[in-house]
Image (spheres, rainbow, N blue to C red):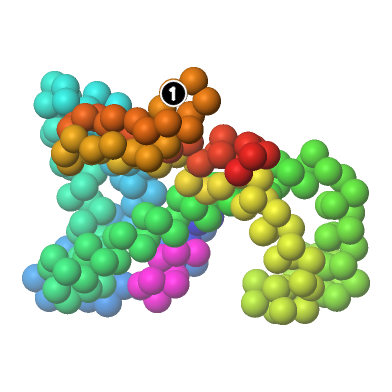
Amino acid sequence: MTPNITTKLIYGYSVNSQNPSERAELPILPGFEAPDRENIGMHMDAGKACVETRGALWTDRWLLPTNEFNAHCAAVHEYAGWVTQDPTELRSQALNVLTAGRDTTASLMGWTFYFLCRYPEIFDRLRGQILERFGPCIASAPNNIEFKDLRDSIPYVSLVINETLRLALVIPLNERVALRDTVLPQGGGPDGDESLFVPKGRRVLIPTYAMTRRKDL
């Protein structure tokens, strides 16, 4: 679902990964073969999996074969390049937003449904307000609710989403690498209030998911 949303916002064309019959015809570019829209989601998933594996291996990532990874990258680049004009700058900008928007949206949707299942009173309140405002959605008379209408007419939707983001950040882990020897003002010693030496090349993992559960922060 999320590739459909982000591709529609960025490119003006949805990949319609769930319903091929709704896929719009891409413009014809003389001399260029149309990209693989049907499998674009698979290529993105597989390519990101390769990136994650390479990151986990770190300095030993050269051991991984690259043929499969390069093929997935080529397919994604081909799709992005189809709707941009600059082969490098515009494609890089588009892919940056597409990748970020796709994964974070999927994460937020998954966590929102998870928490709504665990807190039925919140689910009932939210569902009740939606039904009161828009009525039931049936196949014979779909109401085609747009998110903007949902957000503007039912503020509780934004409250549920914001609380979900507070409990489960869409970026659960971040990391940095020290470019040179440095000293952090805190983090060392038995209580963590002393300085901490970080040598050049050391990876520092930042568990933002865990930080949201630390009452002292």
**Residue type at the position of mark 1:** Gly
Position of residue 77 relative to residue 196, above or below, is below
Mark 1 neighbour class, 10 Å CA radius: few under 14, some 14 to 19, many 20 or more: few
Farthest residue in the left direction? 31
Q: Tell me what residue is drawn at x 35 percent, y 31 percent.
A: 196
Q: Which region is colored magenta?
A: 5-12
Task: Give the percent coordinates (x, y) of residue 79.
Answer: 26, 61
Q: Considering depth in this image, is 209 or 196 the residue closer to the camera?
A: 196
Q: Compare residues 55 and 192 and report the one nearer the observer.
A: 192
Q: Where is residue 170 shown, x and y percent of the image?
A: 52, 48
Label 1 belongs to which residue? 189
Taking 107 as reference, is 102 above or below it? Answer: below
Q: Is residue 45 visible?
A: yes
Residue 172 counted in the magenta span = no
For residue 102, which quarter of the picture?
bottom left
User: Residue 59: which quarter of the image?
Assistant: top left
